[in-house]
Image (cartoon, grey):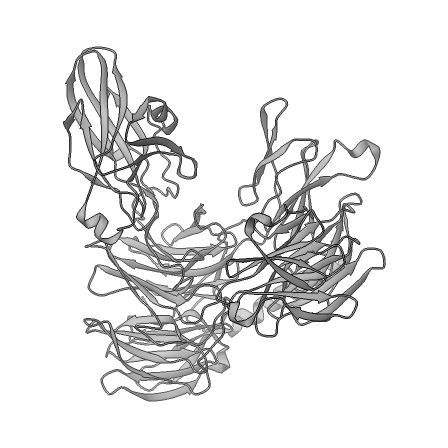
Amino acid sequence: MDLMIRILLVGALVTVAIYCAAQDARAPAPRDHGVAAPAQESRGVVACRAGNGPNDNDHYLVLGNAMDFLLVTDIDTEETTQFFMPEGVPGSYPYGSIMASNNKFYICHGRTFMEFDPTAREWTFHAVPEGRDSAYNGFTEGPDGLIWCGGCPHTRLVSFNPETRELKDHGQMDKAEQYLNTLAVDSSGWVYGGIGTARCNIVACNPATDEMTQMIAEDQRVHGSGSVYPGQDGKVYGTANGRHYRLFEGKADPIEKADAAAAKSVGNIGWGNTQFSLPDGRRIAAYSMPDRYLKVYNPETKETKTITFDYKSIGASITSLAAGPDGNVHGSSCHPMHYFTYAPATDSITDHGGVPAIGGGNFCAITSQGDFIIGAEYAGGRLWLCDPAKPWNPTGDGVRFGMSSEKLLAAGEMEDGRVVHYDPDNTTQIRGNKIGSEAHFKLDAPTDGNYYFYIIPYECPLYCTAQFLFDGKEIGAPYMATSPTYQVGKMQSFGPLDLKAGEHRLTVKLVDSESTFEKYRTTHLWFGIAALEFGQAQLDATTIGYVRNPRVLAQWSRDICRPRTALAHPDGKTVMMAGFAGYGLCGGGIGMYDLAANEELLLTAEKDLLPGHSTITLVALPNGDLVGGTSVGAPGGGHTTATEGEIYILDWETKKVTFRMAPVAGDGNIVSLAVGPKGLVYGMSAGAGFFVFDPDKREITYTDSLAAYGGPVRHALHVGPDGKLYALMNKAIARIDLETFAHEKLTDASITAGGALLNGVLYWAADTRFWSYDVPDLD
C-alpha cells in the first residue's frame, strides 16, 4: 500500500477514535444518512460554437451553469464534460452570465469573476473585484468588447477587458439600493444600470471619469426595480415606475413605449434563463440539470433528440425538516427544490423530486395538521398541502382521457363567446360574453347502450361557475371553478346514460355564483376543462389521476415571499405560515388557512402585526393564542426600519396583538420559539441569547447565553417527552433542564438547518446531508 494512503488512513482512524471517545458513553455518535437530494440546479444555459475555426461552424456546445461546476455538452457527439471551479474558487450560486462576441463565456460565482474558453475547454481567467459585493447579477457587453457586470448588495459596477485582462471596479451606482440587475452600454460608451428593489432607479456611469448620474427624478422612484436594455440604434432604453426613457451620453429623454427601439442581442443570460436558439437553426427544446437531460429540436428533420448526461455533485442544500403523521421525517431542499422523506423503519431516504411550480425555491418550513403535511414556499409565497398517504404527483398527471384539450377544442362551438386552447395549463378554456353563455361539444355514441362521461375541470381565481347539460338537460350540480390558486379540480363523473347511437351534445353553461362573484367581482366569465372521457367503460374514480399532490392552498407572494415558519394550530383545522415580505419590502405577514371551511386570512405587518418586523418563528399557547418572534431584516432588498427583534402575543379570537417586547437587547432576530409543558415560552435569538417568557405575567423570567454551542439554526428548539429542551446549534446539540435551566452539550455536530424530534431521535441537516442522533434516555 502506498505510504501516503497509509498515513491518511491512520490519520482518519485516529480522528474517528478521538471523536467517538468524546461522545456520551450512553449514546452512539451522530449518524450521517447521506445526501437527501443528489441534484444540482441549472443557473443559466447557453449555446455556442465549439471553436473558432472554419470546420467548427456546424459544431455546437451547450453550457449549463451550476453552483460549483460548468457542464459542457457537445450536441453532435453527445459527450458531456464537467468543469469544476478553478482551484481556490469556492462554489457559490451564479446569478448572471454572458456569452460574449469573442466566443468566451463570462460568469461570477459569488465574488469571483471568471472567463471560460469553449474552444480550449478550460477556465482562462478568474479574479475578485475590489468592491465588497458578494454576487453579480446583471451582465452586458459594450460596443468596444468590454464585459460589464453589476453587483449585489452594494450595486458596484465592474468591467473586464478581454484584451488587457484588467478587472476594474468603477464604484457604487446607488448608495441605498442593493440590486444592480440589468446593464446596457450605448454607442458612446456610457453604461446604464437598472436598480432596485425597494426604490426603482436608473443610473448612468461615464467610464472615462467613473462619475455616476441618476436618471430618475426622486419623486418618480417607487417600490420596484428599474430596467435597461441596449437598442439596435445604439441608444439604451430604460423603464422605471411605468415610464419609458431613451438614454444616451448620460441623458434621459422620456418617450412612449412604442417609440423604443428593438433590443440588441448581447448574449447576457439571467441566472434561471436558457438561450434556446442555435445559429444553425436547431433549438434547445429542453434542459434539465436535476433530471440530467437536454433535448435538441431540428427544424429540417422535424425530430427532437434527447441527450442524457451525468455529473458528480454534493447535492442540493436541505433547508427544512419536520416529523410527519406517517412516522417519517419530511424535508425540502433548495436550488433545486426536491421533496424527500426519511423512513426510520427502513433507514432509507426517498427523493420524490421537485415541484415544477416551485422550481429552484423550497419549502422554507414544514409542519403537519392531522394526516397532512403543510409546506411554506419561497419564492411564490404559497402554502401547500401534501397527503403522504397518496402518490406524489405535483403536476396532476394521471390517466390520459380520450378527449384531450386539443380534441375538445375541435369538437367545441360557442355563439356568445369562444372556445380556445390555453397553452400554459394545457386546458380548453371557455370564454363567455355574458352570464348564460353556452359552449357545446359534440360527442359520438357508436352504438346503443349505457354510456359514462367524466370531466376534469380546471380552477383558478378568474374562473366562474358552470352548469353541465347533456342533450339539453341539466346534469349534476353547478361546478364552481373559482379558486385562489391554479389547479386541477375534482373529477366529475356522470352515468350510466341510456343513449341511442349517433351524435349527442355536452353543454357547459356559464352561470353566476354569489359566492364566486362576491369575492372575485372583476372575474371573467371563463371556465376551464383539462380533459374529458366519453364511452361505455366505467372508470374507477379512485384510480384516476389528475389529483395534484402536493397542491396549493393559498398564496400571499407580496406579504410572505420568504416564509420562515409554518404552524398547525391546536384547533385541528387551521394551518399558517409567516416570514419575510417580497423583494424591496420590509415587514412580513401571517397567512392562515382553514382546512375545514376552505377560507384564507392574511394578517399584514403594517395593519395587524408589528410594522417593520417579519415573523420568523411562531408557536401556539395552550389557550390558542399565538406567540411570534420577529426579525427586523429585509433580505429582498427592502429598507429596514426597526432595530430589535421582538416577541408578541396575538389573541386568537380577535387576531389582534395584545403584547409586544424585545427579549434580547440589541439582537435583530428571534430565531426559534418553543412552548414547554407549563405553558412557558422558550426562545433563542440569533446571537444565541436564550430566554424564558411567561405569557401570563408577560415578562422575561430567565436569560442566558448558549453561545458556547454556536448559533441557533432555523427550527432549533424542541421540547422532548422528558420535559427537557433540546437546542440544535450550528456546532453542537445542547440539552436544557427546564427546572434548573442547567444546560449540557450532548454531542458535537455541524448543523445548518433544523430540525425534527421523533421517537427519541433528533434529525437535522448539514448542508446537503441528512443526519440523526439518538438522544440518551429518550424514547
Please name the residue shown 60% across and 44% down the image: 274
- The quarter of the rendered structure image containing the C terminus is bottom left
Q: Position of residue 728 (x, y in %)?
A: 43, 71
385 vs 723, nearest the viewer = 385
Q: Is residue 538 visible?
A: no
Number of numbered tags placed on the structure image? 0
Residue 458 lies, with reference to residue 180, above or below; the image says above
Percent coordinates x, y for residue 187 in the rendering: 75, 54
Q: Horizontally, is 404 left or right of 128 in the view?
A: left
Q: Nearer the viewer, residue 393 or 196?
A: 196
Q: Position of residue 110 (x, y in %)?
A: 64, 63
- 148 left or right of 292? right
94 lies above or below 673: above
Tell whether 239 sits left or right of 82: left
**Res. 139 image quadrant:** bottom right
207 above or below 70? below
* Residue 51 at x, y percent in the picture: 79, 39
709, 83: nearer the viewer: 83
Q: Quadrant of residue 565?
A: bottom left
Residue 182 seen by the camera: yes
Q: What residue do we see at 23% from left, 21% from top?
A: 505
